[in-house]
Image (tube, grey):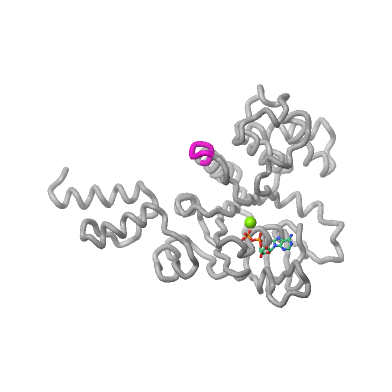
Amino acid sequence: MGINFRNVSFRYNKKASKPTLDNITLDIFKKSEFITILGHTGSGKSTLVQHMNALLLPDEGEVEIFGKHITKKYKDKLKDTRKKVGLVFQFPEYQLFEETVLKDIMFGPKNFGLSDQEAKSKAIEACKQVGLGEELWTRSPFTLSGGQMRRVAIAGILASEPDVLILDEPTVGLDPVGKKELLNLLEDIRINTGKTIVIISHDMNVVAKHATRVIVLNDGKVVYNGPKLPLFSDLERLRSFNLDLPDSARIAIELKEKGLIDFDELPLALEELRKHLKLNLQGAGYE
Ligand SMILES: Nc1ncnc2c1ncn2[C@@H]1O[C@H](COP(=O)(O)OP(=O)(O)O)[C@@H](O)[C@H]1O
Ligand SMILES: [Mg+2]
């Protein structure tokens, strides 16, 4: 069980000839996936993820979310669905509004019907999950750093205990350290709670390091849906999607072309590249 799309099409302008989402069929499973969605600007990524928690509803085809068939008829009865699939928007810090960090995080669970006391305990748990120390709980969210504000926004979604956590370009605007910390945090959440994480990203190093599955959108169509290695191993196809290689793969290919190293499988992580280099250098008499 999870999120199932069957031949889904969607248009913002109902009269437009070309749909924004074009006949999309895919499944997102509930357990422990780390999915990265790639595609050039305007390819439909944000529109797609808004269908995953029924913020937008398809014009054609079917979306099923945790066994619930999403149709316009039940538009007002989608609270449960939105609780199961948490969506963190791009620049979520702009949506913080309460006086204190804790109150902001309690907003979601309260909205889903929990009492103040219950919502508070969920919010505290979520703070711990994202590493927001107690000294920050009574602060105004607007006095925090960019990275901290983003954690508050993520905690606000986590506090409702979704099974699937979706983030639209979560690292945009963060410095390299903040970016790394946030990705490690998402990885920890996935490993410790078994939630599925879906992120929209443009960074191939992030894909190479974290993704268990990659979905590529092009002009509203899913043109790739599978593991990362075959995606990065087919350079021609990668180019046709307008995607880059991760750094380690790019360096490895350059070194191979110069006859300096060899590999059967393209190294996607720096650690793998290092291993190849060491083996090759040892073979050449270097220790
Ligand atoms: N609220 C909207 N109203 C009308 N058109 C929109 C709206 N949001 C996005 N679009 C259009 O839909 C297409 C896909 O946008 P989007 O899903 O935001 O792509 P991405 O996230 O991949 O950049 C683009 O052509 C965009 O201009
Ligand atoms: Mg977008």
Residue 240 in view in this figure: yes
The answer to whether residue 129 is left or right of residue 275 is right
Which residue occupies 62% across, 48% down? 195
Residue situated in front as seen by the camera: 176 or 287: 176
**Ligand 2 visible in quadrant:** bottom right
Helix, strand or loop for the magenta stretch, by majority:
helix
Where residue 96 sits in the image (x, y, percent)?
Answer: 73, 38
Where residue 273 sits in the image (x, y, percent)?
Answer: 32, 51
Residue situated in front as seen by the camera: 41 or 202: 41
Where residue 73 sits in the image (x, y, percent)?
Answer: 87, 66
Which residue occupies 62% across, 63% down? 42
The answer to whether residue 206 is left or right of residue 279 is right
Q: Looking at the image, which residue sits at the far bottom?
A: 17
Which residue occupies 83% across, 66% down? 72
Q: Looking at the image, which residue sits at the far top?
A: 135
Residue 2 in view in this figure: no
Answer whether residue 146 is magenta in the image: no
Quadrant into which the N terminus falls: bottom right
The answer to whether residue 189 is left or right of residue 14 is left
Which residue occupies 68% across, 47% down? 88
> Range of the magenta residues?
175-179
Where residue 218 sits in the image (x, y, percent)?
Answer: 57, 68
